[in-house]
Amino acid sequence: RSVMRRPNSIPIFGICLGNQLLSLAAGAKTYKMKFGNRGMNQPAIDLRTTRCYITPQNHGFAVDTSSLPSEWVPLMVNANDGTNEGVIHKMRPWFSVQFHPEACGGPTDTAFLFHSFIRSISEPFSTSVTTIPYSLPVAQRKVLVLGSGGLTIGQAGEFDYSGSQAIKALRESGVQSIVINPNIATVQTSAGYADRVYFLPVTPEFVTHVIKRERPDGIFCTFGGQTALNCAVKLNEQGVFEKYNVRVLGTPISAIITTEDRELFAQ
């Protein structure tokens, strides 16, 4: 902390415990992890590029990124548990990582960090840091697909095709698929496609009953044409998705509403 207070910015590079020390010196807090991260193959994502590196680690504490001062930002995040893997100052040549880039006995993916540190020594000028918002992927175990319904203009064969492809993609990803579609003459309701099919009208009332019964993690609203879109908007207005903790996958409801309103879409 005394070095950081000096008028001339002396470059600082923290490694492993150095990440916690630098964060504490900056004013952040640390906490004890339940298990810790130990091993030679921990994935760390660089928030400047979202590129993932394999790193060696051995630590039981982590930095609480919510306690970082405004002039500091997270540099790396663990792709397994979302814990902090590094911090960096927005303008000063100060940064640290929770893993071991020297890779003594481990992968050398992050050896470039030493070159970055040496460059900050030989070229001591301030540079701004830009990071990319990142969130860990949320695993979906069961997904509800609003089907194409009856054969009408705008939601006939083209949506039956796209819906059946979505069901195939879910199956290949190991995700259970539930389909609501009253039309028995569609590919997506054929045997061997979805894990479960409800031959029910695609209306808020019936979809709510299915959601209550199946408790899906997510829902696809854009593979059933206009009927499915209107139904999804109504369900969102009624708070059904929030009540049963169903995540809208793909196109968000706000975008559906905008595209349905010609004036909003034009703006």
Image (cartoon, grey):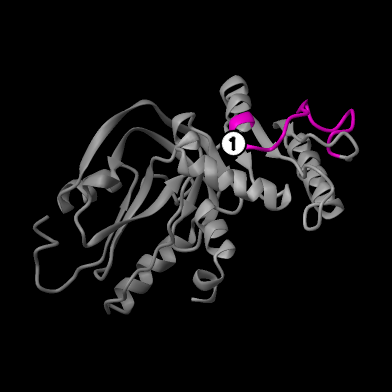
Q: Position of residue 92 (x, y in %)?
A: 24, 69
Judge whether residue 6 is colored magenta: no
Q: Nearer the viewer, residue 92 or 80?
A: 80
Q: Residue 65 at x, y = what percent?
A: 29, 46
Q: Residues within 10 Å of mark 1 (few under 14, many from 20)?
A: some
Quadrant position of residue 171: top right
Residue found at x 44% / y 57%: 47
So how many labels did they put on this image? 1
State the quadrant of the N terminus: bottom left
What residue appears at the point 53 percent right and 44 percent down from the top-left corner?
A: 234
Tell me the SS state at disc 1: helix
- Near-viewer residue (111 or 189): 189
Residue 37 percent coordinates (x, y): 43, 32
> What amino acid is labelled 1 in the image?
Pro
Horizontal placement of 197 versus 44: left or right? right
Q: Nearer the viewer, residue 50 or 97?
A: 50
